[in-house]
Image (tube, rainbow, N blue to C red):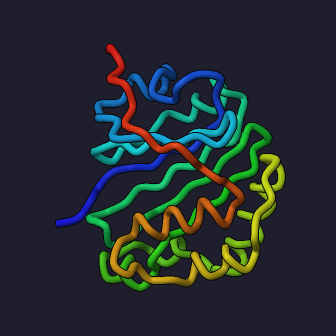
Amino acid sequence: MGFSGSFIVARAGHALAELGALRALDCESLWWGQDGAWQILQVCPVADPDPSIIRETGAFLLVAHVVDSDFATVQGAGPDGLSWQCVLSPEMARDYGVPGDWIGDSAEVGERAVAWAQRAGLQPDSGALAAALAAECDPLAEDLVFALVHALGFRFRGTVEPEPVAV
């Protein structure tokens, strides 16, 4: 049995776990990393933050839901309305019954993801992005999430366990 949970990426002036949209979730923060004002937070179980997080931060948002370390669904959205979605480890996702429209065409998804990353002020790597979108988990879908995040231009460092947040 693998990891089932979420990775949430957003830009905020304080810890992501302290945002109202995330405090409202019934989940445990496992760890986080930082790239300037950008942060990544791993939570368990799968958590779907309210879209109000974009209004709360004024920034772009990326959420990846990992299912049993086998595949991940990813959604990117921004305050300007640009959004995209994809599935990492598409063959495994098909085995789980994920609809084809969610999996989408990797070239089209790649174009939207690059545009999203550029609007977010990042420098995406189109080749690495295409590779991440086409890859199957070997062995963990979490590795594909990190490959995607890196391909989008994030450089998270100093990953640490988050401080518990009072609810």
Residue at the outermost top position: 166
**Residue drawn where x is 32% and y is 72% of the image:** 70
Residue at the outermost front position: 158
Question: Where residue 88 sits in the image (x, y, percent)?
Answer: 48, 72
Where residue 42 sits, quadrant-wise, is top left
**Residue drawn where x is 83% and y is 50% of the image:** 119
Where residue 22 sits, quadrant-wise, is top left
Along the line of sight, the residue nearer the viewer: 143 or 87:
143
Question: Where residue 20 sits in the image (x, y, percent)?
Answer: 49, 20
Question: Where residue 68 sits in the image (x, y, percent)?
Answer: 26, 65
Residue at the outermost left position: 1
Where residue 133 sits, quadrant-wise, is bottom right
Q: How many marks?
A: 0
Horizontal side of residue 33 vs 45, given as left or right: right
Horizontal side of residue 84 vs 117, given as left or right: left
Question: Where residue 74 sits in the image (x, y, percent)?
Answer: 52, 59
Relative to 163, is 128 above or below?
below
Relative to 24, is 121 above or below?
below
Relative to 104, is 54 above or below?
above
**Residue drawn where x is 32% and y is 15% of the image:** 167
Quarter the N terminus occupies: bottom left
Relative to 28, is 121 above or below?
below
**Residue drawn where x is 44% and y is 68% of the image:** 143
